Structures are given as C-alpha cells and as structure tokens.
Amino acid sequence: MKNENMNERDDLGSIGIGAMIVFIALILVAAVASAVIIQTGEKLQQNAQQTGSDTQEEIGGKISIITVWVGEQNDCDAAVAPGTAGDACITLVYELAAGSEPMDENDVIWTITCLDNAQTAMDSVWGTFDGDVVGTSGAADDNRNGDGVVDTVAMNLDTVHVDGTLKCVDNDATAGCAQAGDFHDDDTLQPGQVYMIDLKTSADTTDQQAQNQGECNPVINEQHELTLSVAGGGTTTEILSYTSVTEGQSVV
C-alpha cells in the first residue's frame, strides 16, 4: 500500500510538471504571436499614415490652373528702351488646389518646354513664382528685395491678385498698400485665393536669369507644355495650344 501511494504521487507530480511546461510553452507562443501582431499592426499603421500624407501632398500641395492667355508680346516687363524688342509673356491665372496649405512663391517652379526655332530639338524656359513686383504704390520697398527700384531681372513678373492689384502686406491701419513705408511684398500663397502671374516665354538683355534659358514664344499652331511643380508637393501639367498670338487669346 505504501509503495502504491508513492507511485501514485509520482504520477501526479509528473502530470503537474508536464502541464506546467505546456502552460509555459503556451504563454511563450502567445507572447511571440502577440509581439508579431503588434509589430505588424504598427508597420501597417505607419505605412497607411505615410501613404495618406504622400497622397495629401500630391493632391493638395499643387497648383490648379484656371486659365492661360497670350500676354504682352513685346517687352512685357518694360525693362528695355522704347522701340527695342524685349521679352514676351503669357498670363497664368491659378489657385492652390483644394486641401493645400499656404506655400511660398519660391517653392513653385514653372517650366515651359517646346521645339526650338529649327523644330529639331527641345527648348525650355523656367523660373519660380517669386518674380518682379510692378505697380505704382509709391512705397520705398515696392519690389522683392527692398532696394526701392522695381526689379526687371527675373523670368516672370511677381504674382498679383486676379484683379491686378499688388499682393502685399499692409503694415498700418490704412486700406491697401498705397501709403509709403507700409508696403512689403507678400510671398505667401493662400488657399482660396485666385492669383495671376506673367511668365516670360523669352528673355531680354536685362534678365539675370536668362543664362541657359531658351525661347518658347507663342507661335500659331504650335503646342507647348507648361509644368508647375511644388517643392514637396505635386505637379500640374497643361498643354498650351496657340491658335492665335493676339494678346488676350486663351490658350488653355
């Protein structure tokens, strides 16, 4: 009887140890599985957030073209002597795409590509949306660098409101920017605002950015490609179809 009781206890102890080993093994397996599931979930969440952020930048951080028409075709920035041939321009009306955050004019790069005059190779002109400030506000810093002289050295005039008024920061209580000393060029583009800008399709002798620039002036029956790229955002491409080179003729 004593031996049988001892054997029975040994059997029960073995069963208990085995069950404990199985239990510990199950806990380890569950812990490893949980870690894998959590890690996978975090990775999927990060990928989803990154994809959403990239999509938002691609869709929201870009320029929406409203219309483009043929601009001044002889010295559009009034930078050369009267009677001297100057640069030509097209006029672009645009706004920030829905969902966009405010952006700096220098972050928007425009490019026009076309066939050269010999129709044998590609040519291009380019610049940023931060260009010349034109107007007659009389303020001491009525230009982008504050030297008191209207700039005529960039490949585009400065962005203005769609009604042609200067885009500026008013530093006093007066309306507009007509008071000397209160005008400052506003280089920030705001969502919900419609803007207008003249892009030079060729450069003149005063344009400091003319080095390596080509010539894509409007030519009847030609099609040029306009590309607007936002740093860290999306790209907008539009074909400019010239059925006329008369100033004011729509090309989009």
Image: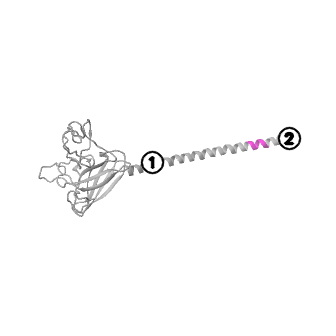
Which of the two residues, 78 or 163, is positioned nearer the viewer here? Answer: 163
Query: Where does residue 229 sit, x and y in percent of width and height?
Result: 33, 51
Residue 18 picture quarter: top right
Which of the two residues, 75 or 140, is positioned nearer the viewer here? Answer: 140
Of badges 2 and 1, the one in the foreground is: 1
Q: Which residues are magenta?
A: 11-16
Residue 50 marker: 1
- Is 70 a magenta residue? no
Residue at the spot 28% in from the left edge and 52% down from the top edge:
93
Quarter of the figure that contains the C terminus? bottom left
- Is 12 a magenta residue? yes
Q: Secondary structure at mark 2?
A: helix
Look at the magenta stretch and give its main secondary structure: helix
Which of the two residues, 196 or 40, is positioned nearer the viewer here? Answer: 196
Query: Where does residue 152 sit, x and y in percent of width and height?
Result: 19, 46
Query: Where does residue 53 sit, x and y in percent of width and height?
Result: 43, 48
In three-dimensional space, the C-alpha distance between marks 2 and 1, rounded to whole angstroms, equals 70 Å
Q: Amino acid at mark 2?
A: Asn
Q: Amino acid at mark 1?
A: Gln
- The residue tagged 2 is 3
Query: Where does residue 58 sit, x and y in percent of width and height?
Result: 39, 51
Quarter of the figure that contains the N terminus? top right
Residue at the spot 72% in from the left edge and 44% down from the top edge:
19
Label 1 packing within 10 angstroms: few (<14), some (14-19), many (20+)? few
Q: How is the image coloured?
A: one colour
Residue at the spot 71% in from the left edge and 42% down from the top edge:
20
Query: Is the residue 172 above or below the residue 112 in the image?
Result: above
Q: Which comes before the other along the chain, label 2 or label 1?
A: 2
Say left or right for 85 vs 24: left
